[in-house]
Image (cartoon, coloured by chain):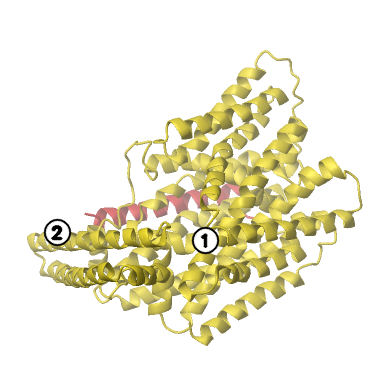
Chain colours: A yellow, B red
Amino acid sequence: MHWINWVIVAVYLVVVVFDGLRRTRGTTNIEGYFLANRSLPWWAVGLSVMATQLSAITLIGTTGQGATDGLKFVQFYFGLPIAMVILGVTLVPFLHGAKVYTAYEYLERRFDPKTRSLTSLLLLISRGMSCGTIIAAPSVVLSSIFGWDLIWCVALIGVPTVLYTVIGGVQAVAWADVKQMFVIAGAMLAIIVVLIVRMPIPMDDALHIAGAAGRLQVFDFSFDLSKTYTFWSGILGGTFLMLSYFGTDQSQVQRYLAAKSVDEARSSLLMSAYWKIPLQALILLTGVLVFLYYLFQPAPLLFNPRHDALVRAQEPAAYASLQSRYTAAIASRQAAARVASTARRSGNEATVATALTEFRTSEAAVSVIRTDALDAAARVSGEASRDVNYIIPRFVLDQLPLGFAGIFIAAVLAAAMSSIAAELNSLSTATVVDFYQRWIRPTASDGHFLTVSKIATAIWGVFACIVATYAATLGSLIEVVNRFGSFFYGSILGVFVLAMIPRVGARGAFVGLLSGMATVGAVAIYVPSISFLWHNLIGVVAVVAIGLLLSVGASASATPVRRSTP
Amino acid sequence: MTPPFRTTLWRVLGIQLATLILLWLLQSRYAS
């Protein structure tokens, strides 16, 4: 990469860290450190929530997914606005009004300490590991692209993030997120403009070709539980997934607990709902444009340079054969695309249909060769190819004008850092508030808790970096943890739903939580055909049903918490 | 100044609906 691009990356890193360090004002007590003294404006909280969700893998993986699979992934987000509206009128007033530091703290007030500790512990296990994967995913891509050792890529992302999160607390995290959101949006817009300007055929023709290749198919109305992305899994399963994530995951809850008032907290949530579907559609559309771009430019056989080099070195004859088949196939596909574009201007529908059929055939031929190449890469490297994650980085580095690569790498770092910072901050909050303060040292000075919080953030940061460094070897373990995480996300939401039903007692909530997790686990193991998007819905229903059943008839052992705000 | 909750709510729903309509139009016109 050109030195000017590196200067852009360095400037970005210095600004983010310097600004984070500057924002230590107000972080002299634990409320300032974890909740910014509940002083953040709604728009900053909203941008922070958006930046937190937009991880580096969204930026590189989702765009790549757009290039290979088209727009259908956007259906995953259809439930998000619905979830935000439901949370805005239910859980947000509850949690903000309860003046708690963690969502789980509220569960102790409503039920008992063991429900609080269990839910908080589940968060620590799952998010601690997932924080490692959030660092690992872009690090692996950067390591392969630049040929660096993985540990340096982990350090490039992890060290500055840990530094400003430890020192500045949530204040630094939230304001860094705001800037990072602008960097990410700027980089995406710049890429889109370049792609449109460089398209060699009229955009209308190009979109017809993308449509013929299946890249513009958005909606799938089939009610098939085994299909991951359908309209119904997005609307129903997606709503419950988003309710679980935004309503019970401390990394999200902490954002709106830091808002000035309930109204500001609600508005911040809705603000992130404003742009989520349009933003995801735009990210996927960028991938579709990259697909179109490579119809007219020679695309690499394998986008992952390390895998490309491995196959070339270890199976030279097979590689040469694949490469020559591929060169011929993409030349024929390019010709077919141009014919299709010209045919559209002829106005003859039969000619257009024939040309598009011809194009589809040539596209299918290219796909077959790519699949063979990906199989060879997986065989030689002994790991899943994940070539989709390399499409956009390679496109930006190889094809875009000077400076764009620097902005893009800065955006990838920004996306990774904003997600990691939020996770570290929430992990530290849950560790200190739900465990250290609750069970080990209930009373101490604010200064003491502040120091402990900073140490906890640093320890979680180091832990996440270690997990990230060993991500390749821990692959299956991380998958197990993520799978385990999907068992309880919906169940925790179920406990929060129970908390809002006055008659439900502590026993119903705790047993309901355990039963919900067991139910989802059983469904995942014995009915694997049911897509994971439905797991949260199953978890919520199981917990609420069992919790209610156990509470019916039981005397009002539960003492409902009075809502302190309307 | 925070906009009133109901105003924000209608804006959110409006933007989502507009996006869905745009995506539907994109699919109807180009997907084949």
Q: Nearer the viewer, residue A88 or A60?
A: A60
Residue lying at the far bottom in this picture: please name it: A3
Q: Which circle's residue, 2 or 1, is located before the other in the chain?
A: 1
Residue type at mark 1? Ala
Image: A116 above or below A20 = above
Looking at the rendering, which quadrant does residue A484 occupy?
top right
- Badge 2 and badge 1 in a common chain: yes
Q: Position of residue A455 (x, y in %)?
A: 79, 58
Q: Is residue A398 left or right of residue A100?
A: left
Q: Is residue A47 visible?
A: no
Residue at the image point whose x is 77% and y is 25% from the top: A559
Residue matched to label 2: A357
Q: Position of residue A500 (x, y in %)?
A: 66, 31
Residue type at mark 2? Thr
Q: Is residue A524 visible?
A: yes
Residue at the image point whose x is 14% and y is 59% from the top: A357
User: What element does badge 1 sit on?
Assistant: helix
- Give the chain letter at badge 2: A
Looking at the rendering, which quadrant does residue A542 occupy?
top right
Q: Nearer the viewer, residue A159 or A35?
A: A159
Mark toward the viewer: 2 or 1: 1
Dot label at residue A137: 1
Image: A413 above or below A361 = below
